[in-house]
Amino acid sequence: MQSQIDFLKPVFLAVWACVAAFAIWETRVRESDTTAALAAGIVLLASLLLSRFVLQLPFKTAPMLYLALLGFVHLGAVVPWALGLYDLGRTPWLSPYGMSRALALITYSIVSYQLGLLVALRGREFRNKPFEDDSEELKGSRIFVAGSFLFFLGAIMFVVGLIQLDPTGYYHLTYSETFRLRAESDPRFFGTGITFAFIGLCMTAAGASRRQTRAAFCYAAIFFLVLFYLGFRSPAITAVLLVCAVSYKKGIKLPRLIPLVAAVALLVAVPLVRITREQPTNAQSLARSLLEINILDGPAEVGGAIRPLVETIDLVGPGTYRHGRTYLITMKGIVPNLAFHWEAAAPESIDDLPPNHWVTAIVDPWARQNHEGIGFSGVAEPYMNFGLAGVIIYFPLLAFLLVRLEQVSIQSSYVLASWALIVGPLLWTTRNDFTDFFRPAVWGLMCVGLVRLSSGGLNFISRDRRVGGIGGKARISDATRLEGI
């Protein structure tokens, strides 16, 4: 069996190279949205197969999760449409015309990312370094306890923030009303609660023993159900994927049917939430909502990242690239707003807004005025900064980074928690800009560092007491001997 796999590896590689070359050629000689969508979809499928069967990257690893999410959030609507299986009239935010340039960029990003994987692994199979289960540091529960504390702190902040949005009627808010009130009143408790809960979830999953892993999965289920029910699907899905990836790093194997059952459930749940989230919570009808959904509404809704990509390409071009400025703007979000009465900072111009707010303010001013948004795209941000060259350079570097992170030897729960707090926000950036990376990553790493420092201080104090106790006993015995003399 292994010899057959080894024989097919060069075949897979040759097929992928032919598919990639043909797809790039199609984007250069034709400007057909249908053809471009099918080409991008075929390249994505070929890249997933090549990564899985030639590079031996499991789907639970960070490089594969990013590749799958990158393709899904950009192609979930247009590929079913190009195959004639879906009517884009069900997605009024997306026009079935003028997408060829955006689809070409998606193809380039997938091909570049796959080349980065091949270079990082040098065309060989991926070897996962086992989690050091016998490490003394992993037998302590400090990171697990700290993570649990942060998770429940974040949950309490989130609930308090939700109630403060509308103290008398929070239980019947729609998704749009929740989003608007969060932006108008006090986003600190609401949004910061989600951030702290996510950080706590990463630390809990990393620090949990095999017995405590059940608690980590319970936390993940609570996080997922609450946010998903309220309409915040992207952080909910990403958090669950990350907990599964952490479990895989620790050698915990999940039943094989769980991913399949979860995928089928999401196909129903995503379009269902799309309908119910705009109905008051106390007036949602499951039966009526089920009658209104199409099974492909889920992939189409998740595939909404292509809209901000199309809009960004139309708005930005040679001479107007940002040359890294968007990353500097989003880094400012690391510093929390500590004012007692929150007020949004007034930027000097629209160009000073983070990319997701910038594109909304230009293409949909009404949504911007009502504190809504269209999100952003993981392909659009490198293009917005450096054009096509940015896309071709950014994605191989990202693939190389994710492979190296996956190959890090995990010798403590602190390292595993740090790994999760870098990978998780990076997965978010497939559908958002780097605002959603810097804040949770930096805050989370700071929390892990504080726990590490405090545990080191406690170990030093306890060791000092033991040494002092031994020295004290020695001095007493010496004094006793002197008295005897």
Image (spheres, rainbow, N blue to C red):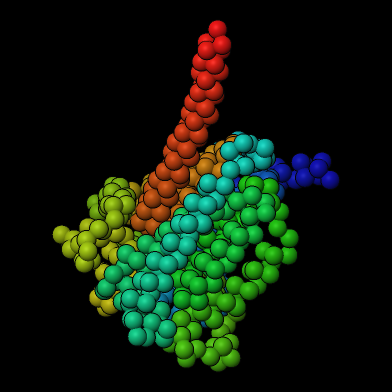
Residue located farthest toward the front when viewing the structure as drawn: 484
Please tell me which residue lies in front, 109 or 134.
134
| 443 left or right, relative to 316 | right
**Residue at the (52%, 60%) spot, across then down:** 239
Residue 296 in view in this figure:
no
Q: Is residue 394 above or below residue 479?
A: below
**Residue at the (54%, 72%) spot, across then down:** 225
Q: Residue 3, image x and y in percent?
A: 82, 41
Q: Residue 380, image x and y in percent?
A: 38, 58
**Residue at the (51%, 79%) spot, across then down:** 273
**Residue at the (60%, 74%) spot, across then down:** 267
Q: Quadrant of residue 369?
A: bottom left
Please tell me which residue lies in front, 55 or 462.
462
How many numbered callouts?
A: 0
Q: Is residue 292 above or below residue 185?
A: below
| 483 left or right, relative to 442 | right
Q: Residue 391, image x and y in percent?
A: 42, 49
Residue located farthest toward the right when viewing the structure as drawn: 1
What quarter of the picture does the N terminus occupy? top right
Q: Is residue 448 above or below residue 92?
A: above
Residue located farthest toward the left when viewing the structure as drawn: 348
Q: Is residue 338 above or below residue 56?
A: below
Residue 196 in view in this figure:
yes
Please tell me which residue lies in front, 313 or 177.
177
What quarter of the picture does the C terminus occupy? top right
Q: Residue 49, image x and y in percent?
A: 66, 53
